[in-house]
Every structure is written in C-alpha cells, then in structure tokens.
C-alpha cells in the first residue's frame, strides 16, 4: 500500500497566527516610519517667504526713514520670456525671472538684459537643461550674461518660474 503520510499535505501555521504576524510586522513598520520621520525633522521648518508683488519691469525701491528711496540692492522683475527651444523645436519654455542690481539702474538696462536672456533661451537644447546640474548651468549662464550686459551691476538673476511644455 501507499504511504499514508506522504499523501496528506503538510499543515502550516494557522490563519490566526499568520494574521497576528502580519499585524506585528505592520505595527513595526509604522513605528519605524514615525521614529525616522521625527529624526529627520529635527526642528521646525523655516517660515515661507511671501511672494513678491507683481511689478514686471519696475524696480522695487526700498524707502529709508526720511521717505527718500534708499540706495542699495534693487530687485527688478523681468517680463516673462516665452519661446521655443532650439532642439526639439516643438518644446516651449516660459521663464519668469528677476534681476538683482547692486544699485538702482535705468529701465533700458533691464530691457537689454531681457532681450539678451530671450536670445539665449532660443539657443537652448533640452539636454542642456535636464536635471539639477543642467539647471545650475543655466542659472550660471544667465547670471554671466546679465552681468556682462549690465557692466557688472547685475549681481544675480533670480529664476521665479521655469516651465517647459
């Protein structure tokens, strides 16, 4: 005759034990997530910076105690730049930026910087601006072009929005 023990399937742990093990493992995972989240937070997040007012092309002039415009760093918002990339030509870029000057500058300088940045944006290729390093290279190029066009008065180009479609 056939061996009876071989014909019967082996019995594993009961359903209750399996559910208990599942609950223990889930509880451990939740606890580890909570602990690691508390460890990574390590303090409060900085307060959000309020958005700048909409004043495209006009400088934000700080005022001193006497009511006169103070000389010093000035932020001027550029008009939005919308153009297509050089390659692939069906991809469009919209760039909203501001220029940080060391002192108030004439409006013509801002318009020249805007036109120069527009001309530069038309020469961009998609692979040049991909990823974090591509963004850093783009920002460095924009800063350099603005500084050259302004004779060193433009200290930084602040990118507010960059959309690719």
Image (tube, rainbow, N blue to C red):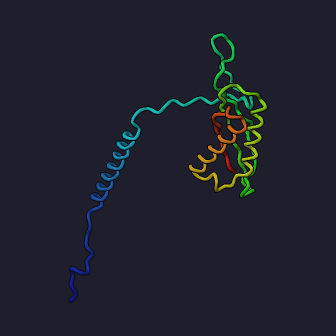
Q: Residue furthest front?
A: 151
In which quadrant will I find the N terminus? Answer: bottom left
Viewer-closest of 149 and 92: 149
In the image, residue 150 above or below residue 36: above
Left or right of residue 42: residue 96: right
The residue sitting at the top extreme is 66
Residue for point 41% across, 33% down: 43
Position in image of residue 16 (x %, y %): 28, 57
Identify whether 47 is placed above or below 20: above
Q: Quadrant of residue 128?
A: bottom right
Residue 74: horizontal and vertical position, in percent? Answer: 66, 26
Q: Is residue 90 left or right of residue 14?
A: right
Query: What residue sits 79% from the left and 32% below the top?
Result: 108
Question: Which residue is most to the bottom?
Answer: 1
**Vertical relation: 92 (above or below) 4:** above
Q: Nearer the viewer, residue 33 or 141?
A: 141
Q: Position of residue 19 (x, y in %)?
A: 31, 56
Q: How many marks?
A: 0
Q: Is residue 34 left or right of residue 124?
A: left
Viewer-closest of 49 and 151: 151
Report x, y in % for residue 146: 69, 38
Identified at 21% across, 84% down, the residue is 3
Image-based side of 153 in relation to 48, left or right: right
Quadrant of the rendered image containing residue 48: top right
């Amino acid at each position: 005759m056939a061996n009876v023990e071989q014909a019967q399937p082996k019995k594993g742990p009961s359903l209750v034990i399996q559910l208990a093990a599942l609950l223990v493992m889930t509880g451990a995972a939740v606890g580890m997530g909570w602990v690691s989240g508390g460890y990574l937070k390590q303090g409060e997040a900085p307060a959000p910076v309020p958005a700048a007012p909409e004043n495209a092309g006009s400088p934000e002039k700080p005022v001193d105690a006497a009511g006169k415009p103070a000389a010093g760093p000035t932020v001027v918002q550029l008009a939005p730049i919308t153009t297509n990339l050089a390659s692939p030509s069906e991809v469009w870029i919209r760039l909203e930026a501001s220029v940080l000057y060391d002192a108030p500058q004439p409006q013509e300088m801002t318009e020249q910087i805007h036109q120069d940045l527009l001309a530069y944006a038309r020469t961009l290729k998609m692979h040049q601006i991909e990823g974090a390093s591509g963004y850093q290279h783009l920002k460095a190029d924009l800063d350099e072009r603005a500084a050259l066009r302004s004779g060193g008065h433009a200290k930084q180009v602040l990118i507010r929005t960059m959309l690719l479609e």
